[in-house]
Amino acid sequence: MDTTEELNGTYFYHGHENVTVQELFFLILIEEFSNQTGMETTAAALMFSGAAIIPKSKVLGNSTKCTSIASKMCRRIFKNMRFKNGKRYMAPIGFGEIRRTPYVGAFIARWMAVSGYAQAYITMMIVAKKTRDKFDLIARPEDRITWPSF
């Protein structure tokens, strides 16, 4: 048998015999996800480093009570480096709130988590598209799924 065949109404896929349509879809999804995990580790690292998990010793006004590893490291690396001409650039704080900051370190740290989430989203869209394409190539026409436009 080849790596992908139809056998008595079920499928044979990479050593798995008597695979149902649902199992075939799941096997392809897992395969495509594992093909993309090289990016996923980077995305997870960026998301984790940008999460506010370190308690602050001093909190002023309505400031957040925690900070992130990225914030600590970027502020240490860039010290009090400011943008030229006193410019203040917008950067996200958590989800939904955006503030302006004149500090290079704070700006970079605040955007790190966002870039991790964006990378994870792109990875999942690639996995979904490759899963759809491979499933539609293998499955019988009556077993195919009507897909959304991705």
Image: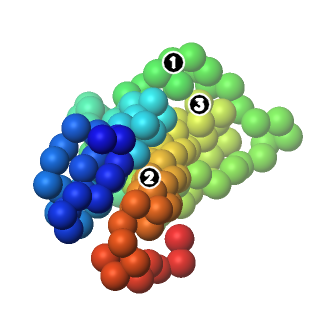
**Whole-Å distance between the Cαs marked 1 and 2?**
37 Å
Position of 111 relative to 56 (above/below): below
Residue 48, how many percent across, how many down?
34, 36
Tell me what residue is drawn at x 18 percent, y 64 percent: 8
Tell me what residue is drawn at x 85 percent, y 40 percent: 85
Mark with earlier residue (1, 3): 1
**Pointer 3: what residue?**
105
**Whole-Å distance between the Cαs marked 2 and 3?**
33 Å
**Pointer 2: what residue?**
127
- Whether the residues at callouts 1 and 3 have beta carbons within 8 Å, the answer is yes
Q: Nearer the viewer, mark 1 or mark 2?
A: 2
Mark with earlier residue (1, 2): 1
- The answer to which quarter of the image holds residue 82 is top right
- Amino acid identity at mark 3: Gly
**Pointer 1: what residue?**
76
**Whole-Å distance between the Cαs marked 1 and 3?**
8 Å
Does the image show residue 113?
Answer: no
Tell me what residue is drawn at x 22 percent, y 38 percent: 15
Does the image show residue 147?
Answer: yes
